[in-house]
Image: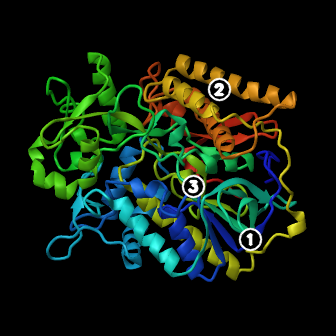
Amino acid sequence: MTSTGIRLHAPAPGWSIDADVVVVGSGVAGLTAALRCEAAGLSTVVVTKARLDDGSTRWAQGGIAAALGDGDTPAQHLADTLVAGAGLCDEEAVRILVTEGPDAVRRLISTGAHFDTDAGGTIQLTREGGHHRRRIAHAGGDATGAEISRALVEAVRARGLRTVENALVLDLLTDGEGRTAGVTLHVMGEGRHDGVGAVHAPAVVLATGGMGQVFSATTNPSVSTGDGVALALRAGAEVSDLEFVQFHPTVLFLGADAEGQQPLVSEAVRGEGAHLVDADGVRFMVGAHELAELAPRDIVAKGIMRRMLEQGAEHMYLDARHFGADMWEHRFPTILAACRAHGIDPVTEPVPVAPAAHYASGGVRTDARGRTTVPGLYACGEVACTGVHGANRLASNSLLEGLVYAERIAADLAAARTAGELVPRVPGSVPAPERPAHPLHAPETRFAVQRIMTEGAGVLRSADSLAEAADRLRRLDEAARDALDDGKTAEPGVDTWEATNLLSVARVLVAAALLREETRGCHWREDRPDADDTAWRRHVVVRLDPDRSLALRTTGTADFPPTLP
């Protein structure tokens, strides 16, 4: 495996750090990987785009799924996950998740995370969409992600791990054989680590989170610009199933023109008995699925969109007035505060909701140890595609996946060091960043991409809408390339690098969605309304060629874990 040679245009590194492992990202996956690597004696550096606790994990409301309750089993959790994944889960990857998950949660608790318990000290469990049992552990009512982030950040600081905050990762460094040799990054701050630098390490763990900012309305924070997927593509790694973007069914509707991060109304609200209704108060999910409002997220999102189209409405309603003030204040304080901040009181009125981009089920293709198709490059969490989620993530499996696969990566790296395989690359063989064939895009490209993707590749897609989106993205890309040829390119900087990454992942998403001519999971093609198991019970795998063209192929579910070099 060799790199494509494509790199972002950036100044040469002015400083460097040496380590055994660099972990890029500070959510549940990244910090778990870092803590386990450090505990195994590996010199570890954590690089994060903002502050340590600013990733997507802290925004997770619902909780973390694991078979912890009486009568629940990993086999039942496996079954629910496979159903939600709509035929595209890698069953062995899911089996790893559900069998190793309970102990991973217990280790998280031993790290310092506190989950809500009853008077006897037993962890309280709730239900969410697609789960047939109560198996969602939560903290602070609806602040699970914030509690997990707090515990992991405190552990990282207590153990003295080296961290570099406010750092946007740019590109993978490789040696002459195409093996990982570290990353380049840009630090926004003061001190000895400022501007463009490098972390030299024989192993890189991508845990950069999602790419929700590719759409106009999303539950993702502003830092979720697909940086890890874009970096992996430029490095020659394979990505898979990027067409499967989960749109959370119940996001607080703030108006048709609302953009950026939108307040999430957790699935746990429905798990506790809230009802989806239209303007007339009719529960339209009853009869549409055996679990009604607790059907898998793709089904609920489609049900909401269908009703909106039928009635010409901009949103539906989530009615939980029957909870009463006490339950809202103690079980869902974060959601209650968000609603009231926008002039809505869910204690006395239904909450307007509509789907918004939430989670990428696809990502950088990995095996069961988190290894990608580039030697020395690992991925875990939302940036990765382990095969666990298939065509649609089961609610609250994401935090668990981050835990389990981060621990597996750390175990693999520890074994590699013991075997003498984790060898630093020769510094002189690391190519310095060069002016790339890849043009940089002006900051305003970000908003153009978001409009294009929302209009053409959102919840509802078709061949026509996707083809138009692909053409508009191509024209954006060609305009920047023409400017580069004329010696006029956007200036390197955080805004231009993020815009460039967003356009890169948007191109892949649309190409994969055009290729998949069916409706499956969270990929909804209006012109192809049915699933096609004969032709499309397959994964779409994409690689970026040196000329920046996309090489697409499909692979069967049995062949999903990649054959690694």
For mark 1, give the secondary structure: strand
Please tell me which residue is depicted at 37% across the width and 49% down the height of the picture: 394
Q: Is residue 287 above or below residue 526?
A: below
Please tell me which residue is depicted at 14% across the width and 44% down the height of the picture: 347
Of tags 2 and 1, which is closer to the observer? 1
Q: How many marks?
A: 3
Q: Which residue is mark 2?
A: 473
| Quadrant in the picture for the C terminus | bottom right
Of tags 3 and 1, which is closer to the observer? 1
Task: Judge left or right: residue 265 versus residue 485.
Answer: left
Q: Earlier in the sequence, mark 2 or mark 3?
A: 3
Q: CA distance from mark 3 to mark 1?
A: 20 Å
Task: Judge left or right: residue 285 versus residue 305.
Answer: left
Q: CA distance from mark 2 to mark 3?
A: 24 Å
| Quadrant in the picture for the N terminus | bottom right
- Residue 541 screen position, x and y as percent: 63, 41
Q: Which residue is mark 3?
A: 208
- Residue 165 screen position, x and y as percent: 60, 63
Q: Which mark is residue 17?
A: 1
Residue 95, visible in the rendered structure: no
Please tell me which residue is depicted at 18% across the width and 33% down the height of the picture: 286
Q: CA distance from mark 2 to mark 1?
A: 37 Å
Residue in front for this viewpoint, 423 or 154: 154
